[in-house]
Structures are given as C-alpha cells and as structure tokens.
Amino acid sequence: MTYFSFLMTEFCVLWRRKHDVFNAVLFFIIVVSLFPLGIDPAPEFLAPASGGILWCTAVLSILMVIEGIFKEDYRDGSLEQWLVSGLYLPLLVLLKLIVQWAGVLMPLLMVMPLLSQMLYLPSGSFWVLIMTVVLGTPSLFLIGAIGAALTVSLRQGAMLVMLLILPFYLPVIIFAVSAIRASQEGAPYFGFLAMLLAMSLLSLVISPFMTAVAVKASVN
C-alpha cells in the first residue's frame, strides 16, 4: 500500500458510502427549511439570525458524518492494516480527513446559495459565509476525528463523541457567526476570518498525531 493508493481507496469508500453524506446534507436542508416555517418567516427575524442558523445546522450535519468516520474501518479490520502497513499513521489519518472534508463540503456549498436566500441573508454577506465555511470546517473535522477515534470501539459512541468535541466547536461557531454579523453591519470581519484560519492550522498541527494515538489505543 502506498499513500496514493490509500487516497484513491478512500475516495472509492466515500463513493460507496455516499448515503452518509447524502443523509447529512438532507438533514442540513430540512432543518434550515424548518426555521422559517416553525418560528418566524419575517425577513426582520431571519436576516440577522441567518448566519447562526446555517452554521449551527452545518455543525450538526458534520457531526453526523464524523461520528462514524472510523467505524467501518474498525469493523472490517482496516485500522489494523494501517498500523502494520509501515506508512506514517498521522499522514494516513490526515488523508482520510481531507477526503471526508471535501466530500461533505462540496454538497454543502452547492445548497448554500438557495438556503441563504431562503433565510434572507444579505447578498453582500454570502461570500463571507462561504469563506467562514471553507476556513472553519477543517477544524471541525480535525477536532472531531480525535473524538471519533477515541470512541470507535464503543457500540453507542455517538452521544459521547458529541459531549467530547462540542465544547471545542464553540469558538469556531462564535467567530464564524461574528464574521457574518460584522459583514451585515458593515464592520471589519477579516479578524474573525483570520481566527478561523488560525484554529484550522492549529488543529492541522495537533489533530493527526492525537488521532493516530487514539486509533492505536482503540485498536489495541
């Protein structure tokens, strides 16, 4: 096994399990659509809250994918093969996360224009929303992978994963929503985007190694 063959295998696995991504995106669409129907369809309410609605729903959708990111690999023995392959385990973890992130991010970005219009997000803030999603979601996957690896051997680990990683998601949500709100008010927002990028880079440095340690502990 080489790193390239591993990457291609992960793309094939993602395509074979595309229903997981579809369920997460469908959940995202349904929950966002329920806000105007169930709370208040008035633009005066939805426009200021649109950034928070989209981001909180996106986080929950991503959690649906992250919880089982290593489950199938654990069940079919792939994680043991990672350990004995002779390849650098943190890099294998990072490659898998890149594939999963890209596979979830692209469908979310495709439905964002329609849903942002539904929530009356100002057109000038739409690209800020996209930038927050692109810059902020890598840290969500990187942080979530640690919790998923720690609980991969547990049969009912979904709730435990949420309890472990949700507190670490709060800064990402706060800075992302603050950037969108600042753009709506005409205030500077690049500082918030810089913080999202910094958190993603910090997670990129730490997460692959901690996830690799968690994978070894779960397998052994």
Image (cartoon, helix red, strand yellow):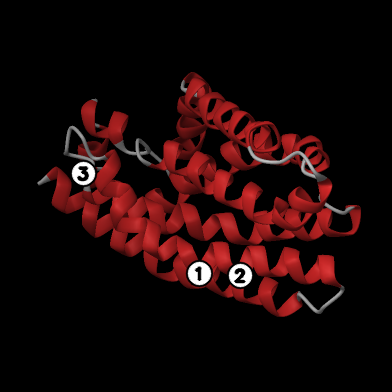
Q: Amino acid at mark 1?
A: Pro
Left or right of residue 39, residue 184 in this image? right
Classify residue 64 by image quadrant: top left
Residue 93 appears in view: yes
Q: Residue at x 48, y 73 (%)?
A: 202
Q: Is residue 153 above or below residue 9?
A: below
Q: Position of residue 190 (x, y in %)?
A: 75, 76
Instruction: Pinpoint residue 44: horizontal percent, then vertical percent.
Output: 81, 52
Q: Residue at x 90, y 52 (%)?
A: 123
Q: Which residue is mark 3?
A: 84
Report if the CB atoms under discs 2 and 1 are less than 8 Å apart: yes
Circle nearer the viewer, 3 or 2: 2
Residue 74 as seen in the image, left or right of residue 132: left
Q: Which residue is denoted by mark 1 in the rendering? A: 171
**Which residue was labeled with disc 2?**
175
Residue at 74% x, 41% y is 112
Closer to the camera in the image, 161 or 43:
43
- Looking at the rendered structure, the secondary structure element under dot 1 is helix
Which mark sits nearer the N-terminus, 1 or 3?
3
Q: Residue at x 54, y 56 (%)?
A: 138
Residue 90 visible in this rendered orientation of the protein: no
Q: Are marks 3 and 2 in contact (CB under 8 Å)?
A: no
Which label was assigned to residue 57?
Answer: none
Q: CA distance from mark 3 to mark 2?
A: 40 Å
Instruction: Check disc 3 and give the amino acid type.
Output: Val
